Amino acid sequence: MLTIENLHVSIDDKLILKGIDLEVKSGEVHAIMGPNGSGKSTLSHILAGKPGYTVTQGSITYLGKDLLDMEPEIRAREGVFLAFQYPVEIPGVSNIYLLKAALNAIRKYHGLDEVDAMDFLKIIKQKTALVEMDQEFLYRSVNQGFSGGEKKRNEILQMAVLEPKLCILDETDSGLDIDALKVVANGVNSLRSAERSFIMITHYQRLLDYIKPDYVHVLADGKIVKSGGSELALELEKKGYSWLEEQAAA
Amino acid sequence: MSTSAQQIENLIGKNYKQGFVTDLETESFAPGLDEVVVRKLSAIKKEPAFMLEYRLKALRHWMTMKTPEWAFVKFKPIDYQAISYYSAPKKKEDGPKSLDEVDPELLDTYKKLGIPLDEQERLAGVAVDAVFDSVSVATTFKGKLKEAGVIFCPMSEALQEYPELVEQYLGSVVPHTDNFFAALNAAVFSDGSFVYIPEGVRCPMELSTYFRINAANTGQFERTLIIADEGSHVSYLEGCTAPMRDENQLHAAVVELIALENAEIKYSTVQNWYPGDKTGKGGIYNFVTKRADCRGDNSKVSWTQVETGSAITWKYPSCILRGNNSIGEFYSVALTNNYQQADTGTKMIHIGENTSSTIISKGISAGKAQNTYRGLVKVLKSAKNARNYTQCDSLLVGDRCGAHTFPYIEIKQPSAQVEHEATTSKISEDQLFFCQQRGLSPEDAVSMIVNGFCKEVFKELPMEFAVEAQALLGISLEGSVG
Amino acid sequence: MAAQRNQYFTEYQELHEEFPGQNLPWLNQHRKVALARFSELGFPSSRDEEWRYINFSQVEKKVFLPKPVESTDQVDRTAVVSYFVDDCFNLVFLNGRFSTQLSDISELPENIFLCSMKKALQQFPEQVSEYFAKATENEDHGFIHFNTAWFTDGWVLKLPENTQLDKPLHIIHVATDSDVLAATRNIAVVGENARADLLESYVSLTTDAYLTTAVNEIFIGKNAQVSFCKLQNENGKALHYSGTYVKQEKQAHFIHESFSFGGQTSRNEVHTDLGQASECELNGLYLGRKKQVLDNHTRIHHRLPDAISRETYKGILDQRARGIFQGRVIVHKDAQKTDSEMNNRNLLLSEDAEADTKPQLEIYADDVKCAHGVTVGQLDETSIFYLQTRCIDKQAAENMLTFAFANEMVDKIKQNQFRKLVLEQLLTHFPQMEMRKEWVL
């Protein structure tokens, strides 16, 4: 589904990613772990197309197409979804409208009619239940005045409604208490399928207790320094990142 | 008022340590101002003809003007005919050729002020021009500066030695018609500092001028002109003190800075003119026009000021950001106590593309003082992608003072990003209690909090001045803070 | 423009006998003093610090005079009624005079007093004199004096203690003709624990220039609550001055929401004097296009302890429009524990638009929390990106955010019917933005 080859990315002439190779197949769950400043969030931003980054080398192929060539909204309509580490507050735009506008934009892109109002409400009702969100949140402005946990749940709700093919979860566990984490994890798990892949970016192993990855990669200083199965995460939990960073530096 | 509030009040009561008078034989004009006085002044200083013409033009214009009333300060009308417009230490026929010839009484004065003019005892790496009443009495390190091609001399000397440079730049940033006090200054300025940094030169040391008003019933009107030619760099410091006198004295200076392409000027002031006594009697009226013209692309001017003195301060060091990518900065601490009044701030005029400006202003008001920030951020249509960030914080000590914030923001370019924030707070009893609980004395606690409040500005000052500024706030607060 | 002032003076001698309250010496005195002061000052100019960004020169180019509507038959009744808001008492003023025929206040509860200024001056002059010019006594500029001298009518509302207006009161100011002067003077007295929701809208049935001047004096009793929404939606040539002057007693609560969409040159003033532990919330939105000049001027006096003030004004300026905000908060020496916040946010959408802002804090008490913030700039790039990752293209995202920026102010309106009305007007003012109602519903 996604092939990243030799990806080099810089911001303001500073090289952040220094040659990333990653292959994600349909239905796989990959965890990308690493210490602060290793380039984890840069990777998520570059996949979603955030302006301000320069790709100096390498390529990203998504479903056979050049991902880097697409505007952020085209990527999104093609099925790339980024759950933000810090979801943006948009005062004055209601949550439900955003969901509807986004869903219809995808449908239009794929040559489908706009969703029927009744059907839409049915979908929404079902998906809000999935993330245990109160219906009242739908009529509030996007993320405005939401708690940290509510914002993250709202991200998962959007993911559930838009049914993307590739979900990138950027530090979704940060700032969540254990109950909120469970709700978010349940939401994500229920969306797992053979056609949908996940990239989870996280600093801690905690999230991986609830969402079990197929692969774990460790990012340090802009490179993947180690890859393995889910047992690698446990090893990191015990030993920290420093031994890998030393290895990388050596 | 609660005890701890009372304590803060007591702590902030300051002693003015620079309030002594020097006994010197001086030569002064009789009070009064007219064309005759201006002609006499120009003649004494043996000025070139253009200078006299300029002065007379300014005087005529000034006569048509009225004292500005828009500032948030109150004072009795000044009788401009009761001021003497020239006072100088009497010296041997042609003035001192070296420090040995300077009146020892004078040298002693500067020593008391902590400004040794003797090069043996000089401040490390700082060249000093000392201006006493109306004239420059000594400039240190002239030789070393000359080697680097830097001109640093009294304005009166520059008029003799480099008249073309003076004629080209004087009044080009602050025209003689600019405002009431600038017009007055243009007519009667007596001396000041002149700096020229040639192309590509990084000035090898900090330049410093020390102003001292000594004589009674005189006004001090100095004029400073700094030109940083292409690619040059200079850091300039200015300090001021005056004796304690019961009557108010007028200080109306004009400072003009010109930064050409890729040049950078850093201008720092520690202003400690006599603020008047606890009842508001006496003190300096500090009515100053300071303006920088960032004429060249990529030029930068940074104003840093610590204003603790003067009965009334009225000054707005400004930047005209004409060159593309030019940068203007203004960092200010203004402390007012007793009956002091300060109306100070800056103007940032964005003309060139990608120009940016930063304003950080910290006002501390105590006693019955009034402290006002007044600032203008103006982005003209031509200033694509201009940026400004302004932060104005006020700290009130006691409940009889005032702190005011009057920003003016005028934006004519849609790609501009302008952000202004202001807050007002006081030293809370909780903060004080917390510090005391951790073992600090109330004096140290207040001093620490105030210094913390001003930290962003102090870090912009050159080392020598940062120490002086902190000490000065320390004196204002309790008498001994390092 | 001395000539214009002289002409107003002469015209006044001709016309004033038609003005209400001619038999009342106290009112005649007010008018006389005001006329003299106006003759001295004229309309304010940009030389005056409080008016420095606004150019009211248009107002000096003509002499605007009162013009009564002879009969309501001359007025397009359907057009007027189209401005009515459902579930409100709708009060109509035509060219500054109350229209009994067009207004609909029949269901007004008996314990609430509401009538035209003209009628009030005939029937209860002492009660009017108790409040008249009491909230404006320190004002000294051309417009206020002009209004005092020239007002032709207005409304007077009085709510006794512990009463409530069960439906909001909607005052519709309609101008029907060119060169008309619509000058009203209005008073609301809201007793202790009483509660009232008011909406005033300013609309035009003409496409020509005219002058509106309206002065509202509002007295809010202890623990009473008043919400006052203003919608200025006049034609593109209209000149508009309106001032709302408020006195709040202890624990009184006042919300003012100003929406300036129309007019050529418009000045909106809201001034309040806060009582102890009282609260005020002043919000505003100004949308400028073409060569509109929209000036907002607010002043909040914190005179006593424990009061709270909140203020947010937003401007969206397109084409050659100019938006102005001047906000002043004064914390007097007895106003300890004051809590005040002021914000002004501006979006400039065109190369020729301009935003001028002057938020001012004057503080004479030490134990206070005061802050103000101003921004002028463009939309937040992170928000645009966020919407793009949610499938929305960049242009649509920008439109949505611009609209959201404005709608945030509309959203603050608590009365559903007012919110709906303002929202509909907002949508018509940015048609090129493809603004869509469903974005917010």
Image: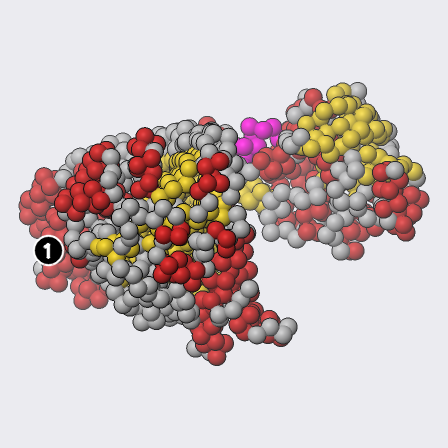
Q: Residue at x 56, y 30 (%)?
A: C396
Q: Residue at x 45, y 32 (%)?
A: B198
In the image, is C328 to the left or to the right of C392? left
Along the line of sight, which residue is nearer the eye, B85 or C436?
A: B85
Residue B330 can be seen, yes or no: no
* Quadrant in which the N terminus of chain B is drawn: bottom left
**Measured from the top left, where is residue B272 in percent x and y?**
40, 59
In the image, is B429 to the left or to the right of C389? left
- Residue to which mark 1 is pinned: C32
Quick one: SS at disc 1?
helix
Chain containing mark 1: C
Chief SS of the magenta region: helix
**Measured from the top left, where is residue B377 in percent x and y?**
40, 42
Please tell me whether residue B324 is drawn above or below residue C174 in the rendered image: above
In the image, is C228 to the left or to the right of C39? right
Along the line of sight, which residue is nearer the eye, C168 or C291?
A: C291
Along the line of sight, which residue is nearer the eye, C243 or C114?
A: C243
Q: Residue at x 32, y 57 (%)?
A: B213
Q: Residue at x 25, y 57 (%)?
A: B26
Residue C53 occupies quadrant? top left
**Measured from the top left, where is residue C55 in percent x and y?**
26, 38
Please tell me whether residue C335 is drawn above or below residue C380 in the rendered image: below
Q: Is residue C288 magenta?
A: no
**Measured from the top left, where is residue B63 in percent x and y?**
16, 45
Residue B108 occupies quadrant? bottom left
**Identity of the amino acid at label 1?**
Lys
Along the line of sight, which residue is nearer the eye, C301 or C408?
A: C301
Residue B114 can be seen, yes or no: yes
In the image, is C259 to the left or to the right of C189? right
Q: Which residues are magenta?
A: C391-403
* Quadrant in which the C terminus of chain B is drawn: bottom right
